[in-house]
Image (spheres, rainbow, N blue to C red):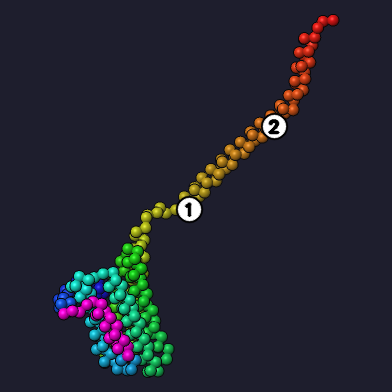
Amino acid sequence: MFDGRWRSTVDAKTEPIGSWLQRHGVSADLLTATGLVSATATAVAIGMGHLLVAMFLLAITGAHDLFDGPVAKAAGSSSVRGAFFDSVIDRITDAVLMGGVAWYLVSQGEGHLVLLPFAILGVTQLISYQRAKAEALGLSAKGGLMERAERMLLLGAGLLFSSILIPILWVLFALTTVTAIGRFVKVWGAANATMPNRPERTRSMVLESRWKEWRERTTIERRESTSRDVTTRWRARRQDGASTRPLRSRRGAQRRSRHTAPPR
């Protein structure tokens, strides 16, 4: 949602801060790497049950992720390498945070609910994969209810009010699933729009096509059969002519001998 609808507003607010950080020697790669460090500290704090501390650490993690792009733009160092590095670190950060939540649920004796963070993580990875695959195919898969910024905010609300952490996790899982389904439908529709239009084949068209194929095949077989018959008759006549030729030759010789014999 933030990445699509409010992207320009967010960029307008963060670009001055990104320029200030860049002037003071902070690089985009440094922010991305230290963001992973703060995410690990957040996961440890969650696992130990210090949820308020974890909420502040999560805010720091989000700030790192928010300002690494503006810093890269201010430095003119935006590149494919940087985008790849940032995307990989984001996926690791998601896994570390959900691991910390799972550890917390285990320590609280929540039983099978420990699987809930892993379910959220699985759908989150699916959303990221859909976007990456769609962009590799030349399609767009941005947008949705629960992109990364929204997930961080919702998780922070759960850490702030620990009594509703589990319901918030269920809401996070549901909305993330809706986002994954929405992206799939969006990319599917865009892919269909790029396919060439094909005429629909009705039953009558299929029958007519089959009739033409049968008629052409029958005509070809009939011609081949006729050609074989003609060849066979020609060969038979040739053999008959060869067998009667010696007899005709002898008769012709006898006639010539009669005409040429001397009178007695």
* Quadrant of image for the N terminus: bottom left
Rendered position, 5 above or below 104: above
Q: Position of residue 57 (x, y in %)?
A: 26, 88
Residue identifier under label 1:
203
Q: Residue at x 33, y 94 (%)?
A: 48
Mark nearest the camera among 2 and 1 is: 2
Q: Is residue 145 visible?
A: no
N-term mark: 2 or 1: 1
Rendered position, 113 above or below 19: below
* Quadrant of image for the C terminus: top right
Q: How many marks?
A: 2
Q: Position of residue 254 (x, y in %)?
A: 79, 15
Q: Residue at x 40, y 54 (%)?
A: 198
Magenta span: 24-44
The residues tagged by marks 2 and 1 sit, at their Cα atoms, a distance apart of 49 Å
Q: Tell me the crowding category of disc 1: few under 14, some 14 to 19, or many 20 or more residues within 10 angstroms, Cα based.
A: few
Residue identifier under label 2:
236
SS class, disc 1: helix
Q: Residue at x 74, y 25 (%)?
A: 244
Q: Which quarter of the figure has residue 88?
A: bottom left
Q: Is residue 59 left or right of residue 47?
A: left
Q: Looking at this rendering, what residue extends furthest in the front direction?
A: 25
Q: Looking at this rendering, what residue extends furthest in the top direction?
A: 264
Q: Is residue 247 left or right of residue 208?
A: right
Q: Nearer the viewer, residue 176 or 88?
A: 88
SS class, disc 2: helix
Q: Nearer the viewer, residue 262 or 245?
A: 262
Q: Residue at x 37, y 90 (%)?
A: 103
Q: Which quarter of the figure has residue 61?
A: bottom left
Could you tell me the amino acid type at mark 2?
Ala
